[in-house]
Amino acid sequence: MNDVETLDMGTPVENNGAKKSLGGKKKVLLIVLAVVLIVLIGLFIGYKFFLTDSKTLYDKAIDKFYAQFESVVHKADNLLIDYDFTKPVVIEGNVAFDTDMTELQAYTGYNYDYRFGIDEPNKQMELYLGMLEHDSLVLDVLARFSSTRMYIESSKLFDGYLYEDGVTNMDFGSLTSIHYDFDAVLTVGTVLRDVLKAQVEAHTFTKQTTTVDGVEGKVLAHSIVLNKQVVTDLKNAFADSFLNNSNALEALTSLLGESQDDVKIMLEQLKETEVSEDMNEVTIALYTTQFTGNVVGLELFDEDNFFRYVEQDNKSVLTIHSSGQDLLKVETEGDTSYLTLYSEDQVMTMKVTENDNQGTLEFVFPSDNGQLSGTGTYSVETTDNTKQVLDLVLNLQLESDTKVIHFSLDTDMTVTVGTELDEINPSNATSIDDLTEEEVTQILMNLMNAISGTPLEDLFYLFMYSSSY
């Protein structure tokens, strides 16, 4: 019994300890809740600062738009080739067409091969034309020119080559090699990006909630006015960035095609040029979502004009507007772009769907008395910056007040840089002046046999008839 009573007497002592323990746990829980609340408030303040801070978002937007620009440059680099006329350049292909146009209808049902070659280092040029019916050659002519001689070849008319001596007056002086220095483009673009980001830190932005066409719901507009001071700071920073960076200066020199000394003078003059007090102030507005800070658009505008680009989900809209009317609108969704060009009272539209350098297009071009509309497909393939192949199919319809004309075109073209022109063996060539009367007659007979029953026959007789007068 005593043992039992002793245990009973001890029970109240144990209950008091449990209450004290519970009280301590409540204090700890309150402290934890307070810390969590402080952290949440801090996170909210941090969110408001970092996700809606104008300067932070402008930095984010500049990086985003530059990445898009860089992607376009890389695509162009993979697609385009240099037309380097310090090497031979050959352009060749095939054309076929069909039409109900009276003047051209006789020439449908044929394929036409062509080749145009320029060998500037060796001062040579060639031009080839061939007419085929159902893949069977009707007539072909190749003319090869040097500075002092012209060669002619035709497998349908005579063997070997005919030539005529004399100065051909070829002028290669106007040939200008086309080189796409995409590395220089990216270097200059990087400098501009860094200049803009640096200037963002130096200026104050206004922020307000608004709506913008092309984006659902309200957005935050982060704006800065390009006044005299801002433009002055930008141009000076731009000039200094190139003057103080040899690599950037070299890239800019390459793009401008000027000497480095001339470019330096231009940049120094840019710094010295005063921005007019009467300049039209332009506002730049960056549009972002209110709560997540996602960049959804950019707009440059003054009282009468604006350039606006907005994007949401998988869609984007670019609009150029001036003096109360749109000039250009490009709407893109996925791989499809819709282009609308406004000219006075006429609206030109084009739809382009492209994937892996292959695409389809639809267009409508109005005119005063009707419209030109059509559809088409195309593909472009480039190999090692030396060869480019273009395939194009077009179906056109020209409507006027009095009639409708249909025209279809199927063509391919290959441009090759660095492939030598075919050599001509002079020992297999005959001077035109040395041809006998019998040889001339035989060539004319071969010509008549080749073009008999083709529209070229009518052209030949027309030429012969007009030459007899």
Image: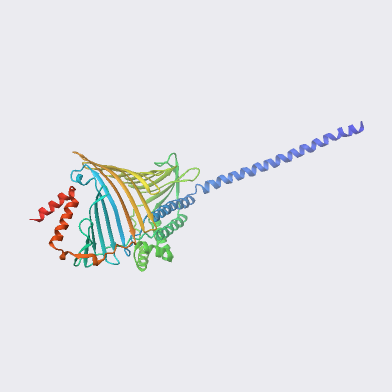
202 left or right of 418 in image:
right
Q: Is residue 303 visible?
A: no
Outermost residue toward the right?
2
Query: Which residue is rendered at x = 67% and y = 41% of the image?
Result: 30
157 left or right of 275 in image:
left
Outermost residue toward the left?
469
Percent coordinates x, y for residue 36 in the rendering = 63, 43
Q: Up-down: is 12 above or below 230?
A: above
Residue 366, by quadrant, is top left
Q: In front: 179, or 309?
A: 179
Tell me how many marks there are.
0
Q: In front: 209, or 132?
A: 132
Quadrant for the C terminus, please: bottom left
Q: Is residue 336 visible?
A: yes
25 left or right of 254 in image:
right
Q: In front: 30, or 72?
A: 72
Query: Which residue is rendered at x = 20% and y = 57% of the image?
Result: 157
The figure's colour scheme reads: rainbow
Percent coordinates x, y for residue 110 in the rendering = 24, 47
Q: In front: 103, or 329?
A: 103
Quadrant for the N terminus, please: top right
Percent coordinates x, y for residue 238 in the rendering = 41, 60
Percent coordinates x, y for residue 251 in the rendering = 40, 63
